[in-house]
Image (cartoon, rainbow, N blue to C red):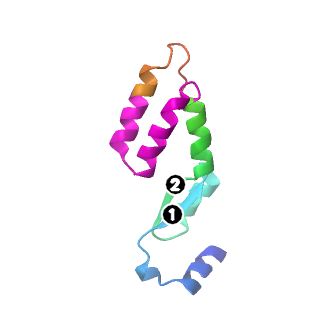
Amino acid sequence: MEITDYIDDNYELDEIETIYLGGDGVAWIKEGINWLPKVKYVLDRYHLNKYITVAIGHLPKMRPRLWEGLNRCDIVAVKETFKEIIANTPKGTKKKL
């Protein structure tokens, strides 16, 4: 496989802790987890931003707070922010993404 050859030719695999595989969440991209060593799948920033915009479009002032928590990898802050977003979302407009 081309990518595994590239990694093998350019890096010391023993020294790699994690390879992050970014994508939009579709199955064929996530399949890379089965082909590459030490891989963690992450939603790419473009699609993460897209989903955040859909989720909090009605509360734009929450966006900086949410991104701050995400950028700090502070799961507690992210969960608290989403709890507040959900609490301030009118009933009947909530959708599962």
Q: Earlier in the sequence, mark 1 or mark 2?
A: 1
Residue 69: x and y, percent?
A: 41, 44
Q: Which residues are magenta?
A: 57-83
On whether residue 72 falls in the magenta region, the answer is yes
Quadrant housing the C terminus = top right
- Main secondary structure type of the part rendered in magenta: helix
Residue 53: x and y, percent?
A: 59, 35
Mark-to-mark CA distance, 1 and 2: 7 Å
In the rendered image, the residue lying farthest to the top is 91
* Contact check, label 1 and label 2, Cβ < 8 Å: yes
Q: Amino acid at mark 2?
A: Val
Q: Is 13 situated above or below 88?
A: below
Q: Could you tell me if residue 97 is visible in this image?
A: no
Asked whether, in this view, residue 22 is left or right of residue 69, the answer is: right
Residue named by callout 1: 20
Per the image, label 2 sits on a secondary structure element best described as: strand
Q: Could you tell me if residue 66 is visible in this image?
A: yes
Quadrant housing the N terminus = bottom right
On whether residue 53 falls in the magenta region, the answer is no
Residue named by callout 2: 42
Please tell me which residue is depicted at 57% across the width and 58% down the height of the picture. 22
The 10 Å Cα crowd at callout 1, few under 14, some 14 to 19, many 20 or more, is: some
The 10 Å Cα crowd at callout 2, few under 14, some 14 to 19, many 20 or more, is: some
Q: Is 23 situated above or below 50?
A: below
Q: Is 28 situated above or below 19?
A: above
Residue 7: x and y, percent?
A: 56, 79
Task: Name which quarter of the figure residue 49 lies in.
Answer: top right
Please tell me which residue is depicted at 57% across the width and 84% down the height of the picture. 10
